[in-house]
Amino acid sequence: EITSKVAMAIDEQIYALIDSLYKTMDTIKSEARAQAAHKTLFKIDNLINERKALSKDFDESPKEDFVIENGVLISYIGNGGDVVVPSNVEVIAPKAFYHNQSIRSLVLQEGVKVIQEEAFYLCKALSFVRLPVSLAKIDQSAFYACKALEKVETRNGLTSVDYYAFAKCENLKDFIIPKSLKDIKDKAFEGCKSLSRAQKKQIKEINKKAID
């Protein structure tokens, strides 16, 4: 039987192939073929994301690492590293992780509905984020200038990304636009120079001012 760790390793190899295919897509001259390839990649990526979300291959961070009131995560007081937010959280409050320098990865469990403004502002060590299906909105400057951020695993459920939400995340190269995402505000991805041309095109189709 394949263990969850081995399965995760396989998934990471698949992600590497997807990244490679995105780069190849940038050289495809036929726009129709590129769009068809992108849709196929999105389906593969979404299935992998759903598979990971269903598997219990991560440990929830200790509850004493957080200040939580009535389902709202007010602040984080842990030691950083790989953070898995408790399952009883529905809202990440403004500046909950503001300017944290020690968080490397973040997993939000099902139940979280909104990430409020500047929640992860200037979290300079944060490189990976996994979002749940329940998340509908990412507010203004939520991940502003997270310069180490490379991958955000999105889900079909996200509907809105606010002004400057991922601005200045200069190393962000993996952010799949789910079908549910219909509202991207101006400058939401300003300065995200590592996104593939195909991803930038998708963002601009929703809002031309979201990147430039």
Image: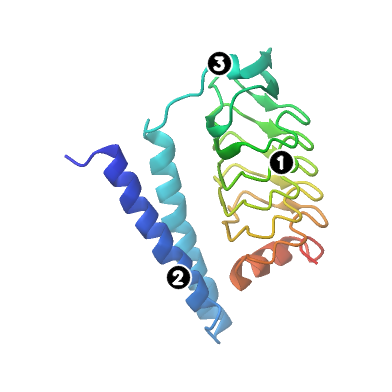
Residue 45 x %, y %: 45, 55
Query: Mark 2: which amino acid?
Result: Ser
| 2 vs 3, front mark | 3
Relative placement, left or right, of 151 versus 192 is: left
Please state the horizontal and vertical placement of residue 206, each as a whole percent of the image.
Answer: 73, 61
Q: Nearer the viewer, residue 146 or 91?
A: 146
Marks 1, 3: nearer the viewer: 3
Up/down of 24 relative to 154, above or below = below
Outermost residue, left side = 1
Q: Residue at x 38, y 42 (%)?
A: 51
The residue carrying pointer 3 sits among few (fewer than 14), some (14 to 19) or many (20 or more) residues within 10 Å by Cα, namely some
Q: Is mark 1 on a helix, strand or loop?
A: strand
The residue sitting at 37% across, 59% down in the picture is: 14
Taking the spot 70% from the left edge, 61% from the top edge, the residue there is 192
Kindly state the secondary structure of the residue where label 3 is placed: helix
Up/down of 8 relative to 36, above or below: above
Q: Is residue 26 above or below residue 18?
A: below
Q: Earlier in the sequence, mark 1 or mark 3?
A: 3
| Residue at 43% from the left image edge and 26% from the top image edge | 59
- Assess disc 2: are there few (<14), some (14-19) or many (≥20) residues with their C-alpha within 10 Å of its C-alpha: few
Q: Say above or below: 146 vs 202.
A: above
The front one of 176 and 5 is 5
Residue bearing mark 2: 20
Q: In this view, does 145 lie to the left or right of 80?
A: right
Measured as percent of width and height from the top left, residue 201 is found at: 66, 70
Q: Which residue is under mark 3?
A: 63
In the rendered structure, find residue 138 and report the number of the disc placed on it: 1
Which numbered disc flags the more N-terminal residue, 2 or 3?
A: 2
Tag 3: residue type? Lys
The image quarter in which residue 125 lies: top right
